[in-house]
Image (cartoon, rainbow, N blue to C red):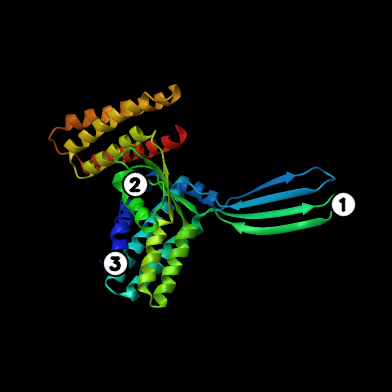
Amino acid sequence: MSDRRVARSTWRPAAAGLVAIMLFAVPAWGQQRSSSSSRDQSKDQNKEETITRTFGKEGDYRTEVTIRTKGKLTDDDKRQAALLVAEAFAHVDEASEELEADDSKEARDEVNKSLEAIKAVRSMLPTMTIHTKTTAPDGKVIYEDEREDQNARVSLFEGIIHKQTLAPILEARRNAVQVAGVHLVEAETIVTEAVADLDTIEAELKRAAKSLQDNKPEAATKALALALVRGIEAVYSKEDSELASARDAIWLAQRALKENNVAEALVNLEISRQRLQLYRELASQDQRREVDQMLREVAQLEAQLRQEGNQPVARAERDRQGHTLTSWWDKLTGWFHRHG
């Protein structure tokens, strides 16, 4: 097996996993926005905020830093950005397939599509203008500079990302760049967050495009792999295993209901409830109130599904149940940060 094929086999599943996770929540995201909230969020996107900090005393050396931030990411924007990054990786996957088929032209088209997705994400992210000015005791400006910056790190997803979904990425990291310290043993090591570095991803994509232009498919394949391997940072926590398991079960229950498989949904709801009960024992008093509310809601849905029996259920009702599960998934995701 060639080196190119080996590299391909280790990281290809990751792109599909990213897209699957991102698409899971898309229907609910679309449902959550009202016309009024859309208008409010549009105003936020165009909002400019200025913060000035001064260092040093009057009559002495004094430095003033002014940061002007244009735009603001709403929750919906963050989800769109995450989805677009997943789309970028899907195009990376397609580009690699085309390279395996020795079709450099199609591979180049896919790389360009991936770059377009990254460009779209960048257009959504807030930009900062940082102006720094230092004056001497006599009032003379001895240093002045202005530069533009952008936080090009995008949180991809914060849940259902331990071994069953993020393992291919971690495996690719081990095989491609031999990252030290990455260890995955069943579900003991839980990945609670994955962050994409657009600067790194974009640089590798441009390197792949240049390699394809220069008719160097092996170099292009390596660059595509590194876009994924080096472009994602994983954050680990062992303490959140019960919460992550509960969230996984909610996701599986949602999938089961989408397929009208009530029996499987009930099994996963029960697993989620059991994991939440274990998590509750480790939570603070305030956190327990939120967990108790979630447990009551899960129990109510379980009771409703059991009452259905084998009776047919309207699609609208099944969709409502699915949206409820998605909202729980989002809520559990938020607990990783607020309860952490």
* Position above or below: 82 against 191: below
Coordinates of residue 177 in the picture (x, y in percent): 40, 57
Crowdedness near tag 2: few (<14), some (14–19) or many (≥20) residues, C-alpha within 10 Å: some
Q: Residue 138 carries which label?
A: 1
Q: Which of marks 3 and 2 is in front?
A: 3
- Residues under labels 3 and 2: Cα distance? 27 Å
Amino acid found under the numbered disc labelled 3 = Glu
- Residue 164 placement: quadrant: top left
Crowdedness near tag 3: few (<14), some (14–19) or many (≥20) residues, C-alpha within 10 Å: some
- What residue is disc 3 on? 97
Residue 49 visible from this viewpoint: yes
Helix, strand or loop at mark 2: loop
Coordinates of residue 63 in the picture (x, y in percent): 75, 49
- Residues under labels 2 and 1: Cα distance? 59 Å
Coordinates of residue 45 in the picture (x, y in percent): 53, 52
Residue ranking furthest to the right: 138
- What residue is disc 2 on? 25
Is 132 positioned to the left or the right of 219 in the image?
right
Which residue occupies 34% across, 71% down? Answer: 107
Residue 109 visible from this viewpoint: no
